[in-house]
Amino acid sequence: MKRILYVVVAAICLLTGCAPDDESWVQAGFTTDKESYEIGDQITLTNTSTAGNAQIAVCKWEFMGKVMYDLASPAPFYVNEGGEYLFRLTVTSDRGAIKSVFEKTIKIIDDGIRPIADFSWSPEQIVAGEEITFTDQSKVVEGREIVAREWTFGAILSTEENPKITFGSHGKINVSLTVTDNKKRKDTKTVTVEVAKSAGSLGVLWSHPYDEQGTVIHTSPATSSDGQYVYVSSSNYNLVCFSKSGDQLWKFDCGQNNEPNRGSSYQHPTPSVDSDGTVYVAVGDNTSAADKNKSASLYAIAGGADGGAQKWFTPIGAKSSMRPFGAPVVTDRYVMILTNSAPSTDGKHFRIYDKTSGSLKYAEKTSSGTYGGCVGLKDGRILVNTGQSGGRSYGTHIFFPNGGNWNKSTNEQDYAPSDQPNGSQLAVGADGKVYILCHNLGAKLSTTDTQALVYCYDTKNTIEGEVPTPEWYTAVKGSNKQTGYGLVVDDKGVVYVATDQYISAISSTGSILWETAVAGTAYGVPAIDNEGYIYYNDTDKGSLVKLEPSTGQAIASLQLGTELKSSPTISSDGIIYVTGMLEGKPTLFAVEGAATGYAANAWSQMGGNPSKNGYMY
């Protein structure tokens, strides 16, 4: 019977032409709608790949510096530069992982004809606070037209044909116009204009380099509570004190514990200042160059004009690093720090020290490491961010006081337990509500809808041992992955959020009020002055930008350095301090404006206030 069955099967295979041992094969291929294109032409690729005795499982497209995986053809696209470009398609079968490659070179013809960008302005004399009309005078050849315009006024954007601009800062500002014609050709013109000073404009009071080497990566200025002294640090392990008039008063070496990478691009935290003037700064390193026995330290330094002397020093532990996103939290009794890599001596990221003696009082491991900040509440509770490991995170831990100790919330009892406060700074309102900016991992909203979420929790309704429920959570535009972003909250509960490409305003009930696109790339946490205006640093433009609070419109942009990878600090007297790079050196900029202080009764900036102590309510 089996013999008869085999004969039948063999006959069927002969008739159909597919024997059981036929080999699988694939053949990659695609066509283009034309053999050559001009700049601005739409390019259409059609996948013509075939397979035998198998299915096509993977199509890998490589062209124009991109790699994409799509069984179908890529969406039609445009090329803006002439030349010859290699297009490659690699096809893989589902049986035996057989591969086939097809390549084709496509020529993009550039006829060399471009629009000519040009513009004028009126009145010719530009004064801060007065409206100026910019007129597009660009030219194109016959048969073409301008279809898009992009103006930049420092770090302010416009796409209008003839925008009306009121500059809020004085000094030199770059004005640029990029025009695009209907054949996708572009041209740009940039002019540096001189803006005269007015009573309400932004301008540089003074600037001062404070290290001969090193970089500024997220480390921001901190001031004394009376605004008389400004403290800055850099990756060269120096803490530097300036007077408000710009005099450098002293420098303290924070690299006395054999910390490596001095002067490199390694990260360095922000200092914080106590009410008695003591300055606290933590340093650390977990690279291969770090000392296996000691590489991280916490210093307490006497502040003020006659300061600069060490009050105490404590080693944190070997192979421990400090993310620059947060300053030490200073309460009435303690100094708290959060490390990225836990000290190898005990493996505990979150650490509390007696601020008088420097002795360690408490240490605890936080889930998945840490990238962000922490906040101390007046009732003794502490909020501590976690990082990400294995594609997940545990949100923000809550530490509840228990005599001279603390009890840590479980992962399930954390704030935003399944999203990631990735390098972001917390904010707490005067009403006890806490706001957390998270990298979206899909716990509440799809990752295809948003990359960033803001959570609001009421700390007064948070009970130890119970799972807290957010008051609200809201999607915001942009990304906040490990770059020290964060948020602030004003006295009415309006939250201002920074991501890489947007500054957003959220109402006290969680609705989006406005979203402002950033001209370059935003860095750090915004700041609010006592008139309600919002400031942020645009690192690509090297500019401090001022936004109007009700609309989010950029009303001033002041170019400072080449990189501003930090958060602005508004002192008690209204001076705005920014750290960044200028001529290859870490530099402190002091900016004057119309403000006379920072926002009262508000979490006005990184660390809550200009002293950066993270301890207000």
Image: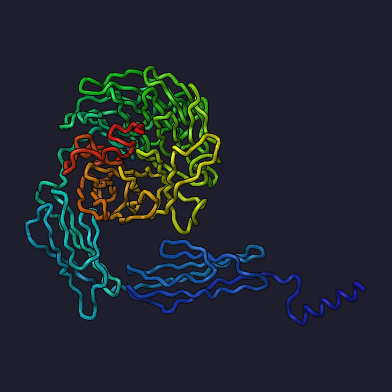
Residue 118 relative to residue 238: left or right: left
The answer to whether residue 460 shows anywhere in this view is yes
Is residue 585 something that shows in the picture?
Answer: no
Is residue 462 toward the left or the right of residue 176 in the image? right
Question: Residue 612: percent from the left, percent from the top?
Answer: 32, 33
Residue drawn 34% across and 36% down? 607
Residue drawn where x is 36% and y is 48% of the image: 508
Give the vertical position of 529 relative to 447 (above or below). above
List the single residue furthest toward the bottom: 15
Query: Residue visible at 36% across and 40% down?
Result: 429
Q: State the residue in front, 354 or 507.
A: 507
User: Which quarter of the figure is the N terminus placed in?
Assistant: bottom right
Q: Position of residue 61 (x, y in %)?
A: 49, 65
**448 or 289: nearer the eye?**
448
Work out whether 468 lies above or below 184: above
143 to 304, vertically: above or below: below
